[in-house]
Image (cartoon, rainbow, N blue to C red):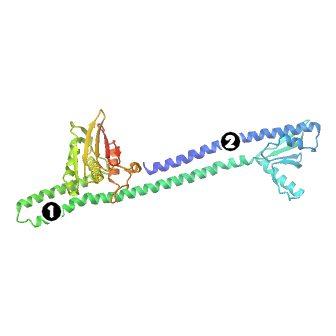
Amino acid sequence: MKSSYIKGFFIFVAVVAALTLYVYTQITVRDLKDRQARSVTLWQKSLESAAKDKTGSEDLSLILEVVSNVDFPIIVTDTNMEPLPNFHRNVSMDSVLSDSAKLVLLKKIVREMDDANPPVRVSYKGLIQQYVHFGDSQLVRFLRLAPFVASGAVAVFVLIAYLSFSYIKRNEESSIWVGMSKETAHQLGTPISSLMGWLELLKSSSDNPERQAQIMFEMQADILRLNRVATRFSKIGSKTTVADEDVIALVEYVFNYYRQRIPQMGKNIELKVKESADIIVPINRELMEWVLENITKNAIDAIERGRGSISAEITEDAGFAYIDITDTGKGIEPRNRKDIFRPGFSTKARGWGLGLSLAKRIVEDYHKGKLFIKDTSIGKGTTFRIKLRKNL
């Protein structure tokens, strides 16, 4: 996935989360303010009811008791907007303040309340007797800020997630570059070293034409190998062409290549391809050969006892061809199975962690197939399955 898509995804998540929080908190704030308005109306009705019996401000404790459950600040003033003594609720004031200082503070709070909410008039016989001023509860004030706090938290989370993703991506890219460099050196090193050896033999065989002909034949084989390596690397990252190939013959070709080299590794491993009718699949031969080499080499390395077998079974159905490569090696630890195809991951002391990840990319990105662990058992072996489309 392109990094620009990742950035867009993180931004989209942040925006959706912020909008969701904002809408939710605004709905909650609206419901709480409606509740406050109903409580203020109750104050108003209580005061108007009290005014029918007594128009003064005495003995107001009954009204306070009626609405004792309100959780937001309320101040009652007379018609001149002067706060009535002891007729306020949920308004915090320092007890050491003088009465005049408390009055000044109450007037200031009244102005702030009126800026947020219009005062409610208390009338008696058509005349305004008092005003009820009210503010927002602590919960409402908190919820007003919550979207901004939550959006900031979401932004920080998204930023951390993006930075973590970028860090992992850079590490994987670094592992790929290092692995590609080592793979290139390995792929080129073997035929180049061989050519250097043949060149020395050629110099010492100037008087033996038959020997020279044999050496030149081997040099030609190594040059073809170099050309094949160059072709493989040139196809990575570019649009590849496919052609119908017999995958059974291709597997046999790769196995035969390793049959000639396994004795030099000090191992006794039998490589066999189960007989079957020809199975034709559209593939890029050079790249698929590389995939099979990587899986086979991985299977050879997994057989640590020096003796074992590697078998390939090729089957097909209406839409797909399946290549199952099974070894009798050590198997894959459960904790490593999810990382086995990750670039840079290797259980070998000198492993590069590129072979299987490169093979998976070739199969899945270039051939629209699948490469996965079909079965593995500690001490018994592993089966890798390549699933290829019969029609691309």
Q: Which mark is residue 277?
A: none
The label nearer to you, 2 versus 1, is 1
Q: Residue drawn at (55%, 52%), measured in percent from left and top?
A: 157
Q: How far apart in space, not on screen, are marks 2 and 1 (Cα)? A: 84 Å
Please state the horizontal and vertical placement of residue 303, each as a whole percent of the image. 28, 52
Please state the horizontal and vertical placement of residue 232, each as a whole percent of the image. 27, 52
Tell which of 327 and 72 is nearer to you. Answer: 327
Please state the horizontal and vertical placement of residue 392, each as a whole percent of the image. 31, 38
Residue with the mark numbered 2? 28
- Amino acid type at image mark 2: Thr
Q: Is residue 292 visible?
A: yes
Residue with the mark numbered 1? 198
Please state the horizontal and vertical placement of residue 172, each as a whole percent of the image. 40, 55
- Against 228, residue 392 (above or below) is above
Tell which of 43 and 127 is nearer to you. Answer: 43
Q: Residue drawn at (94%, 41%), measured in percent from left and top?
A: 55
- Amino acid type at image mark 1: Trp
| Element type where label 1 sits in the image | helix
